[in-house]
Amino acid sequence: MNRVLLTLVAAVAAVAALGYFLAMHTVAGQDFLLSRAISAAGSPSKPPPDGIRVLVCGSAAPLPTPGREQACLAVLTPSHYFIVDAGAGSGNTIGLAGLPGQRLNGVLVTHYHSDHIAAIPTINLMSWVAGRQGPLKVYGPPGVTRIVNGYNEAYALDRQYRTAHHGEDFMPIEFGVLEAVEQPIESVQQLGELTITSFKVDHSPVHPAVGYRFDYKGRSVVITGDTIVTDRLREMVAGADLLFSDALSLPIVKTLEKAAEQRQPRLAKVLSDIQEYHASVTDVAELTRTSGVGMTALYHMVPGPRNALMENIFKREIEDNMLLTEDGMWFTLPIGSDEILVD
Ligand SMILES: [Zn+2]
Ligand SMILES: [Zn+2]
């Protein structure tokens, strides 16, 4: 009996393997698999519950990290969609997640280091193609107008090509530009049920530098930008549901610095300089313990962990309600509960 069963299982496995081989290596099979995969990806999914959702569209800093794009978080409610910082490569994660570019309200920038602004033109193009009905607003502290003017000039030819190719009706050229919205460092925006608070952080010698807090129907998310832990940050984090924090691993950075001293002295200098203007994992853990925050997610990780060993070193000092993010990770905070769903 067992032998009959085994023969049957082997026969089924052989047929499945043959089917897979034929599908992958014949024109008809490839076309079938491709169209099935595309229609599965495009089928509507259940709308998320009312609340705040955050996508990690970039969890790394400038040090090169495979599988992680530079700093980016997308914050959505059913009627709002903002992107906080747009580091290099983050448009890729946003595109893969299928975010609704046509209703992108704006990009909020924390400061003007390259790993926070490099993908603004990519994100602008993606949401212009998706059907955004106006220029893309770029919010930030003083300095944002200069960034926006520079990008608008650098991409002037690109806009002409896109409109000429796809048509003025489809991609009106006046919708393809960026619009600077310069805000005071400390400021509050009320957009229906959503409050966005910009607050001062300390990323010296980089000035200005801000973080953002989002409050929506009783749920709250704080994003530090790049900073050390300050009293103002503590005030903003106090009692919040979810904190996304800059985090530098001193054990890793110090070891990298020591290794670079002989062969790469320029890299060693940079690794030494950066230790002073990012929050260490130790400091973020202390902030988490003392602030009453529900959960802390490390995202602008310096350096972005490349493997389990580096992850474990980051995790040495973290609390039970802290985690290391990955690109593509979603956080959902439904209203009327304390829940934070991570997937
Ligand atoms: Zn940065
Ligand atoms: Zn920075």
Image (cartoon, grey):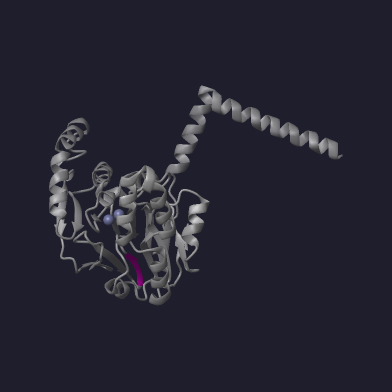
State ligand 2's quadrant. bottom left
Q: In which quarter of the image is residue 223?
A: bottom left
Residue 16 seen: yes
Q: Is residue 201 above or below residue 309?
A: below
Q: What stretch is highlighted in magenta?
A: 219-223
Q: How many labels does the image show?
A: 0
- Kindly identify the residue that appears in the image at 31 percent across and 51 percent down: 269
Q: Which residue lies furthest to the right in this view?
A: 1
Q: Where is residue 98 in the image (x, y as percent from the top left)?
A: 37, 47
Q: In which quarter of the image is residue 240?
A: bottom left
Q: Which residue lies furthest to the front in this view?
A: 262
The secondary structure that most of the magenta stretch takes on is strand
Q: Position of residue 65 (x, y in %)?
A: 40, 46
Residue 304 seen: no
Q: In terms of depth relative to the viewer, which is nearer, 252 or 153?
A: 252
- Kindly identify the residue that appears in the image at 16 percent across and 39 percent down: 154
| Image side of residue 80 versus residue 165, left or right | right
Quadrant where the image shows the N terminus: top right
| Image side of residue 288 versus residue 189, left or right | right
Q: Is residue 59 above or below residue 153?
A: below
Residue 222 magenta:
yes
Q: In terms of depth relative to the viewer, which is nearer, 340 or 98?
A: 340
Residue 51 magenta:
no
Q: Position of residue 218 (x, y in %)?
A: 35, 73
- Kindly identify the residue that appears in the image at 30 percent across and 72 percent down: 236
| Image side of residue 34 versus residue 208, left or right | right
| Image side of residue 146 versus residue 237, left or right | left
Q: In this view, does 231 lie above or below 132?
A: below
Q: In which quarter of the image is residue 131?
A: top left
Q: Where is residue 116 in the image (x, y as percent from the top left)?
A: 27, 52
Q: In this view, does 193 lie above or below 23?
A: below
